[in-house]
Image (cartoon, grey):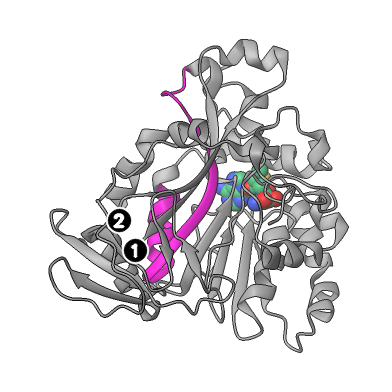
Amino acid sequence: VAAPRDAEIREYVQTYYGQVLKKSADLQTNACVTAARPVPKRIWEALQNVHEEVILRYYGCGLVIPEHLENCWILDLGSGSGRDCYALSQLVGEKGHITGIDMTKDQVEVAKKYLDYHMEKFGFQVPNVTFIHGCIEKLGEAGIKNESYDIVVSNCVINLVPDKQRVLQEVYRVLKHGGELYFSDVYASLELPEEITTHKVLWGECLGGALYWKDLAILAQKVGFCPPRLVTANLITIQNKELERVIGDCRFVSATFRLFKCPKTEPTKRCQVIYCGGITGHEKELIFDANFTFKEGEIVEVDEETAAILQHSRFAQYFLIRLLGEKLPTSGGSFALELKDIITDPFKLAEDSDNTKSICVPEVAGGCCGTKKCC
Ligand SMILES: C[S@@+](CC[C@H](N)C(=O)[O-])C[C@H]1O[C@@H](n2cnc3c(N)ncnc32)[C@H](O)[C@@H]1O
């Protein structure tokens, strides 16, 4: 098979997600059903309110619901049948807004079909969700304006797009300053050989177009984002003998990263921050990424880049931030924490995480990644 060109890939992906697959169970690998860490109760409840046909046609690989969403404007790239949009709709509230964009007509139709159902269920007078049929590499053509969103999310989509840099450039353009791309996707342990990138089923299953994980940081820097912050990672076990043969030694991971649009900083200085609490659902503790968990009232030593993200993003009002050496007011004890090495490798994080020990509670209907566990 010759290397598929962009238009061919687009057409193939539309057929795959529009006609070949009718439900998550039709997938031929478990790339889209990798268990994420336990889902917080508020999010789990929001997911439970989503219509079962929408859930049935969910093909994500992670949980793309960050913290502090009240009144936010969020864009979901490759929104599919709309599961994440409808969950986010409840969390941003009636004054926030969610836009879902997807190029597969059948999926957009399913998403739109249940708009009234969900708005009524959430008790919203004016709908706060809009679905657009369009391509995520061409957000301008879809009418998405510069600096118009607080957050962009995406769940298992960017791997399906050949020109990933263009997608990131578009995201950077439409994000407000201080905004973030919070996204789950599939990454490869090496630069993929042609045998994998030209394999149509592997491409459709979100493996053939997976980025070599180290390339994400390079792309992010080129586009202007701060370095990627790794949130969660889970190894993908293919569980399909024929496809495993084609894949050979390559390994895949589903990982959630956050990319912030913030001013550049000197990487040398160190800072201290105190989380003042107050973020709904995270009053006592904010798990920011795999490296930093901020407990209310506790001093945490961070690199200047992390401090800059906290200072320039929607989290700013919840933190006290000082250059190291300046005295911070504290309600509790003071902790001089050693600055840790930042974990950036999703394979290492996935191997280190012992997911089997997480506490399980009932499955959400049609459970897929990010919905099987709750805490
Ligand atoms: C693996 S599914 C995930 C869908 C959804 N995020 C979810 O979690 O259910 C990938 C989706 O990305 C969409 N997609 C792929 N490439 C796209 C592109 N270039 N522009 C817009 N949508 C795209 C597909 O149509 C499909 O609905």
Whether 114 is among the magenta residues is no
The numbered disc on residue 226 is 2
Task: Give, as a single range, the part of the protein colored magenta.
Answer: 166-193
Is tag 2's residue or tag 1's residue first in the polypeptide sequence? 2
Up the image or down, 255 lies above or below 118; here it is: above
Q: Name the residue nearer the viewer: 93 or 3.
A: 93
* Element on which disc 1 rests: loop
Cβ at disc 2 under 8 Å from ligand 1: no
Against 284, residue 347 (above or below) is above
Residue bearing mark 1: 261
Answer yes or no: do the residues labelled 2 and 1 have beta carbons within 8 Å? Answer: yes
Q: Position of residue 25 (x, y in %)?
A: 82, 37
Asked whether residue 140 is in view, the answer is: no
**Label 2 CA crowd tier, 10 Å (few <14, some 14–19, many 20+):** many
Which residue type does callout 2 highlight? Cys
Q: Is residue 128 left or right of residue 170?
A: right
Marks 2 and 1, how far apart at CA: 6 Å
Q: Quadrant of the C terminus?
A: bottom right
Magenta span contains residue 189: yes
Disc tally is 2
Residue type at tag 1: Lys
